[in-house]
Amino acid sequence: MGGSSRVAKSWQEMGREAIVLDTAHNAANDLGTSEAHDTIIRMLQATDPDGKALVGLLGVELPCNTWSLCRGRGRGPPRLRDLRHIDGLPGLVPKNLEKVAQANAQIKNAVAWIRCSCAQGVPGYLENGRRSLIWHHPLVLELIQEGLCWVSVLDQCQYETEYRKRTLLLVWGVPENAFDFLRCRAPRGICSRTGLAHLHLEGVDQNGRFKTAAAQVYPVKMAQAIAMKFAGH
Ligand SMILES: [Zn+2]
């Protein structure tokens, strides 16, 4: 957690304290445990002598693997959830059942941290792909319905990737629509930044790696943009 995230790095370069919870870079970094829950809550509740939270930003970067609707197409991995089965499709094989249970525990913890973060006046974001089923999770919808969080959209191609990868950030601790990010404006798969066709992220690359997994690392420019938007508030 923290250092491996590019957003955390950008934020710290501006001399600020951040917790960026990031499982995309380290699968062993399980955010779904009760230990992780308690540790992060304690960090969020830590204050200086004036009662101001020590943490300046909470970023939650959960892997989209089990939430992705891109699964189940082409040569990619099978789909593990759908809209009617947000907590996991019936009849999953044990290996996938375990993955889904782990991701379910992570989102539960994440929502608890977001609520604590809001109570402490610590702004932050939770990131996932536009088509991720995480945006249909009842606990996430509640945060929006209660007015604690709002959603911002960006296209990663505008931050110098060859693929578009439309991404949503659930934002809290900052007034609604206080900032926005770059979106690709060109129609029919042509990128408004490069004028070239977007690279597609379905299936596997020449090394047998799922392309969606390869695209989980944030582009540096996007990480800098996120850190700067929050620093401006
Ligand atoms: Zn584009």
Image (cartoon, grey):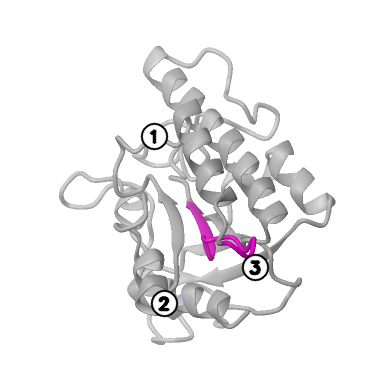
Labels in figure, total = 3
Residue 152 - label: 3
Magenta portion: prevailing SS class = loop
Q: Secondary structure at mark 2?
A: helix
User: Mark 2 sits on what residue?
Assistant: 224
Vertical side of 173 occupied by 192: above or below: below
Q: Nearer the viewer, residue 120 or 100?
A: 120
Which image quadrant is residue 164 in? bottom left
Question: Three-letter amino acid code at disc 2?
Answer: Gln
Q: Nearer the viewer, residue 213 or 59?
A: 59
Residue 136 visible at all: yes
Q: Is residue 121 left or right of residue 166?
A: right
User: Mark 1 sits on what residue?
Assistant: 30
Q: Which residues are magenta?
A: 49-60
Q: Residue 159 at x, y = what percent?
A: 41, 78
Vertical side of 123 occupied by 210: above or below: above
